[in-house]
Amino acid sequence: MNDSQNIKLIHLITILFLLLVSLSQASTIDPPTSYFSQYEFDFDCDLCGCSTGSGSFGFGTLNNANFVGVRYINQQFESKNGVFTNSPVSKETFNTYQLWAQVPINTSFYVSVNVPYQDLNRSLNDTNENLNGIGDASIIAWYKLPFYKKVSNEEFEATEKENSGHSLQFGLGVKLPTGKFEEALVDRVNPGFQVGTGSLDAIFSLGYNYAADKFGVNTLLSYYLKGENKNEYKFGNQFSYATKFFTAFAVKKAMIMPFLGVSGDVFNKIEQYGETINDTNGAILNSSLGTEFVVNRCIFGVNYTLPVSQNLFGGNVKSKNRLSLYFNFAL
């Protein structure tokens, strides 16, 4: 990041930190003995920014499944502009500002919505480029299937059902072509340098959750079936997977939930005019760490992601790191 971006990020972190301090000082509710017994836990995943999938960095948070909030995502890339070892390298910064929410329909169904604003920057030699505007919004409907275990009630000589902590989630949704797609940019080394895809895409997801005592694990598998836009350009279909291991402990009147995880994406080749484009497929494996900080119904989260291995666009595009900050209000 350049100096101005670093200053903006420091200001954002400072504001959120001061807000959390004031909330913790104002809190009068003692934290629960078992945080997992109070809340249902959702899942999170990481999506590669170069897919231009609205810059999404996950569908939810570790804690309460229902919320409204804002999220900031910073992603860094380097693209090699040429086939030689000394070919110039462009540095790209993707800044995404999101309004996102997860709203319950009933005890079994809920909907997640994401509306992003993209601010993309690219520098090559002494040339700087900037793209900004509303990105591709997404909406996903979810069905949650909890699993129960039978326990004996000796007092009434009966058998009762008790939540086992295990559950499955099934998601079906769409990504809307609300972001602008510029055909003039498709010849860039990183075709993901776009505000939007211009296409209507389908999203299929399967999640598994387990939470008991002070330990939890979330796993999510997603497949993105990309559509063709009006320019006869089609981003490659995408398979994403993610697993996070987390715990929770109380600090005064707040709750801290640190986590570690792995995630990855596999991309098919891009197609244009019915023909595939070489060196537009690839895969990436990421490691991630972060935490959520909870005071009453306010949730602050930070997630840092670093690639472990990658081969994107014939090795010409490299993901450097990603940082996500979010502030949510639990419903």
Image (cartoon, rainbow, N blue to C red):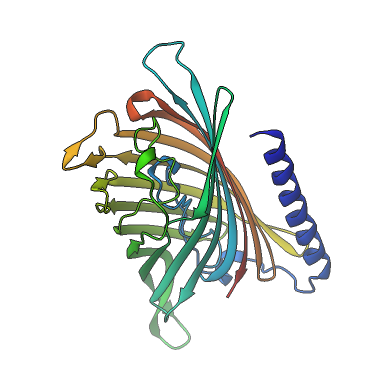
Is the C terminus in the top left, top right, bottom left or bottom right quadrant? bottom right
Could you say where residue 207 lies in the image, as x and y percent from the top left? 36, 58
128 lies left or right of 238: right
Seen in the image, is 299 located left or right of residue 274? right
- The answer to whether 227 is drawn above or below residue 82 in the figure is below
Name the residue: 42% across, 22% down. 81
Decide if residue 146 is in sight here.
no
Residue 167 location in percent, x, y?
38, 64
Point 22% across, 41% down: residue: 272
Q: Is residue 38 above or below residue 80?
A: below
In this view, which residue lies farthest toward the left?
274
Residue at screen point 50% across, 26% down: 90
Of residues 51 and 198, the one nearer the viewer is 198
> What count of labels does the image hold?
0
Quarter residue 313 falls in: top left
What is the x, y in percent for residue 241? 37, 46
Front residue of this view, candidates 316 and 149: 316
Report whether 287 appears left or right of 328. left
Q: Is residue 73 left or right of residue 31?
A: left
Inspect this view and state whether residue 56 appears: yes
What residue sits 58% from the left and 71% below the top? 38
Of 142 and 95, which appears nearest the observer?
Answer: 95
41 vs 229, nearest the viewer:
229
Q: Position of residue 252 (x, y in %)?
A: 78, 61
Rendered-image quadrant of the N terminus: top right
Q: Quadrant of residue 198?
A: bottom left
